[in-house]
Image (cartoon, rainbow, N blue to C red):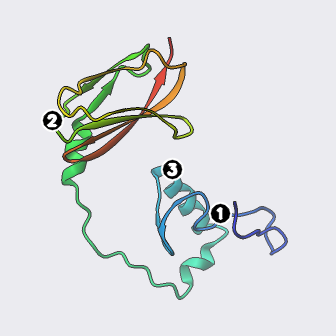
Amino acid sequence: NNTCNDIGQGFSSDLLDMDENFMAYSQNTWMFSHDQVNAMNATLNGERSNLKNSNVTVNCTGTVNTNNMSENNKIKVYPNPTTGKILIKNLIQTSNNSIVVRDILGKIIFTSESGNNLDSLDISYLEDGIYFIEIAHSNGVRIEKVILSK
């Protein structure tokens, strides 16, 4: 829900709030997807540009760890779309590996914590649709959107 209705406050439409539909980890701390960043930049450079000149302290210090991302980007999930069998390439096989399959609403459909030998997955028994394959491994978690079309 929009926490602040801007209609009638000098605006002709209801503008984005900083915490509207974004992942809030704590008060005044958010994480955005690439598309959400574009939407927020457009809003903050337009109708809400006055927020950039407010007395809000922004903490932009810290280091972003990119080691896990480079390893994570090597993992390939294919084919996509699939008729049911999914192959997982470049997953370093360890006992810490697990796979979770979620439907479009986030409901867990399948969980595998077999550790090694997670190089393929059969979802042909599921209904056609969009699923999210969450691969947890020693270097982090990778989530892939997969379209099942038989």
Residue type, mark 2 in image: Ile
Q: Residue furthest right?
A: 8
**Residue hosting label 2:** 92
- The image quarter containing residue 3 is bottom right
Q: Is residue 24 above or below residue 50?
A: above
Residue neighbourhood size for the residue with mark 3, other residues' Cα within 10 Å, grouped as few (<14), some (14–19), many (≥20): few
**Residue hosting label 3:** 35
Q: Is residue 148 above or below residue 95?
A: above
Quadrant location of the N terminus?
bottom right
Closer to the eye: label 1 or 2: 2
Residue 38 visible here: yes
Between 10 and 30, the one lying in front of the other is 30
**Residue visible at 58% across and 68% down in the picture:** 18
**Could you tell me residue 15's position as x and y percent?**
70, 64
**Could you tell me residue 28's position as x and y percent?**
50, 75
**Residue hosting label 1:** 16
Q: Which mark is residue 141?
A: none
**Residue visible at 81% across and 67% down in the picture:** 7
Q: Name which of mark 1 and mark 3 comes first in the sequence.
A: 1
- What secondary structure is found at the residue carrying circle 2? loop
